[in-house]
Amino acid sequence: RSICGISPITKYVLPATCIAGGLCVSTCLKVVTSGDECLVERLGRYHRRLGPGWHWIWKPFETVSFHVTIREFVMDVPPQQCYTLDNAPIQADAVVFLKITNVEAARYNVEDVNNAIMNLCLTQLREEVGKLTL
């Protein structure tokens, strides 16, 4: 028993429990900002999608596997050497405006979504330039 009348349990155990609980809560809380979405996997399998707001993640069992913006963004396609229908060489570049609407498909159907979009844009650019006659 302490001189002040405070028991050792109240003096040491209660603050330690509060600190441990606060650390647990702070690591399990996931804040998703406006315009973003996250995918959560539980034990390695897709479990749920998180929209904007505060969400609880049970750290030993769940992980945030994919964080993406669902706002429209710009992708610059670098200049490419293309050939027209009459075999004239042309340097063509492009700017692509895109928006991911299906986060699950962007994560699980394609290995690298940005690379896949870039390759699709380059293919379309070459195909359209190939139809031109100078």
Image (cartoon, rainbow, N blue to C red):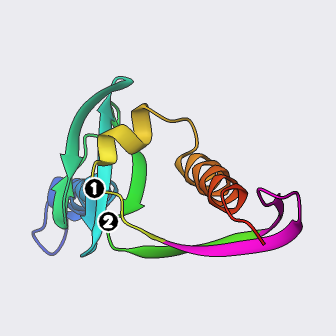
Of residues 3 and 46, the one drawn nearer to the viewer in this rendering: 46
* Left or right, residue 67 beside residue 54: right
Give the quadrant of the C terminus. Answer: bottom right
Magenta stretch in the rendered image = 79-96
Per the rendering, the mark at residue 70 is: 2
| Residue for point 89% across, 65% down | 88
Q: CA distance from mark 1 to mark 2?
A: 7 Å
Would you identify the image quadrant in which residue 126 lies?
Answer: bottom right
Foreground tag (1 vs 2): 1
Query: Is the stretch drawn in magenta largely helix, strand or loop?
Result: strand
Residue 77 at what x, y percent from top left?
68, 69
The local secondary structure at tag 1 comes to loop
Q: Which residue is mark 1?
A: 101
Q: Give the answer, above or below, for where 131 lies relative to 106.
A: below
- Assess whether residue 9 is covered by the magenta stretch: no
Q: Amino acid at mark 1?
A: Thr
Q: Amino acid at mark 2?
A: Ile
